[in-house]
Amino acid sequence: MTETLKNTGFEEMTLNMGPQHPSTHGVLHLLLKMDGEVITEARPDIGYLHRGMEKLAEKRTWGANIALSDRWDYIASMSNNFAAVLGPEKLMNIAVPKRAEYIRIIMAELNRIASHLIFFGTYGIDIGAFTPFFYAFREREMILDLYESVCGARLTYNYFRIGGVSADLPEEFVPGVKAFIKYFRPKLKEYDTLLSTNPIFMDRTVGVGAISKEEAVDWALSGPNIRASGISFDIRKEDPYSVYSEFDFNIPTGKNGDCWDRYMVRMNEMSESARIIEQALEKLEPGDIMAKVAKVIRPPAGEIYTHVEAPKGELGVYCISDGSTMPYRYKVRGPSFVNLAILQKMLRGLKIADVVAVLGSIDIVLGEVDR
Amino acid sequence: MTDQEILAKIAEKFPAVVESKPAAGTLPAYSLTVEAPAASIAEVCAWLKSGGLKFDYLASLSGVDLKDKLQVVYHLYSLEMKHKLVLKVNLDRAVPELPSVSSVWQAANWHEREAYDMFGIKFTGHPYLERILTAEGFEGYPLLKDFIAKPDQYD
């Protein structure tokens, strides 16, 4: 109990935020202990969306796990697919055809834009600006339409296969992506005038919830969250998978690690993703989309930890195979789960009004936190 | 730094930490893998972080049920020196206990809670070792291979 509380005779208050609350982006329960308006202790209570993904994975074939992976971070399913196929492919030493690699990268980067657009829209709402949401969802809709033309699904794509992808691109896809990129680039400037440099928005985010470099590493943050603190850590550069080493792109970083920096890193990442997509479209040539893979996937006994740079950070899968058709152990290291843990540290000492600004800036998806 | 150099440095400081050889018939390890005794894991990790090897980033911490024993696997990475290490600790299935490393890397805090929730592995010295993902009042440890799910109102 603080001095003020003792002197005034007031008591510490416990406040439950969520699990049903529009700003928690799903079913997250925050237990806040308050000294007036100041938070003295914060405890995130998670697990409301726990579906036992890792246990389910042990009872499904390696291929079926790709469909399951769609449900981790359900707004960036392509990246999840990517993480789900890399492990068995490396264990079985499968060389994926070049065309499939480029298609995968186009899909993953489009998904990064779609995921960051959701962040942009919902973060605006969290702070109190309603309009960005409509802008963001208008653009995201175009990406979903492109996905629909390729694999028929708009959210749970199940598009990747061990050894390639499930279907070749339809004729209208490449012109569609080119048209989208051309349309999308000027929109990024529009977003900046709309929200990024808006004085009210900056008042709410600049200097709020700053994470130092040391803290970011200590809590093993990844993705835009660690980069906003000034550490240029990106799996695509650090430990390149697929054919990412062929592309020329920058890693946007922040300086102060506050909410605004985390926001800006994501905004800048979208234009870098657009650059990667353009390069991949140029390299795209006709060819196979699937490697020659046995009908029944049986990776030899062994283990591997593979990771990809998902929109939210390092998405790792630790696979252990015992040589059968199903994984022996399938641990999913979700970036949202790890990034959310720092919240208990960050919220301490902040005012209650900043909780939503800080939580929104970490950009979590509860499907991935709870798995 | 090459894997051999890392291994030599670790062996010099902790002779009990040895390279883990994959069982016969399994693929060779993709990255350097070492095994450490459970009792000294906190000291080993503290040295790995602050010693010359600078493993400052705990990428992942997983529990594994190998039927005859339990295992905790740490995937470590050094942001500064760009090398990685897989650290394994074998545990007795009857008394799965080892010191917590959450004071070394804060990131271990929730990972250890998850391993406790799923495997019943007790991390001594953890600041708040409570179940994290399963529902309140859940019995048993679901990721153990001998776990039998109790049918509930939805089954």
Image (cartoon, rainbow, N blue to C red):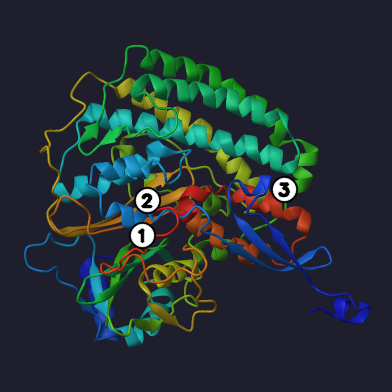
**Mark 1 is on which residue type?**
Lys
**Mark 2 is on which residue type?**
Glu
User: Would you say the residues marked 3 and 1 are in contact, meaning their CB atoms lie under 8 Å apart?
Assistant: no
Mark 3 packing: few (<14 Cα in 10 Å), some, or many (20+)?
Answer: many
Q: Are marks 3 and 1 on the same chain?
A: no
Q: Chain of mark 3?
A: A
Task: Residue at 38%, 75% (x, y): give it.
Answer: B120
Mark 2 packing: few (<14 Cα in 10 Å), some, or many (20+)?
Answer: few
Q: Is residue A41 left or right of residue B75?
A: right
Residue A267 visible: no
Q: x, y (%) of residue B131?
A: 49, 70
Residue A182 visible: yes
Residue where numbered disc 1 is placed: B82
Q: CA–CA distance between discs 3 and 2?
A: 29 Å
Q: x, y (%) of residue B125?
A: 48, 84
Q: Nearer the viewer, mark 3 or mark 1?
A: 3
Along the line of sight, the residue nearer the viewer: B61 or A324: A324
Q: Residue furthest left?
A: B25
Q: Secondary structure at mark 3?
A: helix
Task: Residue at 52%, 67% (x, y): give it.
Answer: B136
Residue where numbered disc 2 is placed: A238
Q: Along the polypeptide, which appears first: circle 3 or circle 2? A: 3
Q: Chain of mark 1?
A: B
Residue where numbered disc 3 is placed: A205
User: Would you say the residues marked 1 and 2 are in contact, meaning their CB atoms lie under 8 Å apart?
Assistant: yes
**Mark 3 is on which residue type?**
Thr
Q: x, y (%) of residue B15?
A: 24, 86
